[in-house]
Image (cartoon, helix red, strand yellow):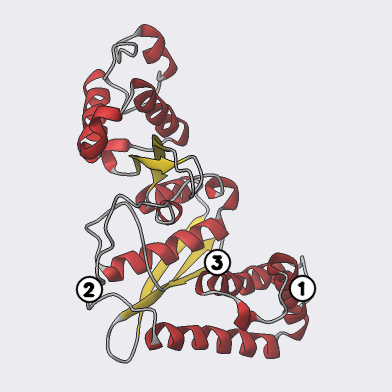
Amino acid sequence: MGSELALDDPRFREELKGVPWATEIKLQLIRNKIMEDNAKNASKITDSMVAQFIFRAAALELDPLGNQIVAVVHNKNIGTKEKPNWTCVLTIIVTITGMLAIAHRTKQCTGVDAKPLFNKNGLVVGAECTIGRNGHPFVGRAYGSFGGVIKDYSPQDKAMNAATRKALRLAFPEFLGSVYGEEEFSQEPAPQHKATKPTTNTIPVTEEADGLRQQTLDDIESWHKKNPTLGTLHKEWLKNTYNVDRFGLLNEEDLGIAYDQMANLDVQAAEGKVVK
């Protein structure tokens, strides 16, 4: 680490005035935690990265030592595939714990109900989560492969966390729309890591995924029959969002988003914003 940033610098401390965890000891522990969590790239971590992370955590009112927000220092290609130019960058991740803390802080979160989805063989194929906001339900569904920066989660926990993140974003877009979650980081290219073979507890993208995909398509079709007016709006949303006319053309992730959009239309109808 360089010497241009001192945690006891009066100007630095002035910016953090009122932040409960911004004591001298805790700031040093946070810096140590960043170094330990990113041991492979510890030599590339700069003081400005540490400062950026600390200020972001303070702005979001999240506790870094409580694992509500984490710093990931990783390699990123800022060039092209043909002419790669790898550099070390900081990505600030708000964990599922942090997202829930933000939602509960609004005092509008009226319930969180997450449950795993299993196939006939007992394997985890996904999860569904319902978040209540002022009594209105917002449903997030996730299935397939689940990423994340927290490595100790079981496949079942990863699935429920993925579904909960989606539901939270739907329910509290103005608070969580701009935060970078674990699901985005899982899409970052990482050629420096070798691919690992899935365990028997995770879903291979085969018949199990196809089964849940068909279940989702059936649910959408059934909902359209019960709600023809909303179904028309749902199809218009599909065309405007993806420029296709059939839900079966969507990939697994986008199909899950389409499923969530049904819940959004139900909420808008309940609030009188659209005619049901």
Closer to the chain start, of discs 3 and 2, is 3
The amino acid type, in three-letter code, at marker 1 is Glu
Q: Which mark is residue 138?
A: 3
Residue 58: image location, x then y, percent: 42, 30
Residue 219: image location, x then y, percent: 57, 86
Closer to the chain start, of discs 2 and 1, is 2
For residue 5, what is the image quadrant?
top left
Viewer-proximal residue, 8 or 101? 8
Label 3 packing within 10 angstroms: few (<14), some (14-19), many (20+): many
Give the left or right position of residue 166, taking residue 275 as reference.
Answer: left
Cα–Cα span, label 1 and label 3: 20 Å
For residue 43, what is the image quadrant?
top left
- Tag 1 secondary structure: helix
Please say whether residue 164 is visible from this viewpoint: yes
Nearest to the eye among marks 2 and 1: give it. 2
User: What residue is disc 2 on?
Assistant: 199
Residue 88: image location, x then y, percent: 37, 35
Residue 55: image location, x then y, percent: 42, 27
Label pair 3/2, CB-CB below 8 angstroms: no
The amino acid type, in three-letter code, at marker 3 is Phe
- Tag 2 secondary structure: loop
Please say whether residue 92 is visible from this viewpoint: no
Residue displayed at 62% across by 70% down: 261
**The C terminus - image quarter:** bottom right
- Tag 3 secondary structure: strand
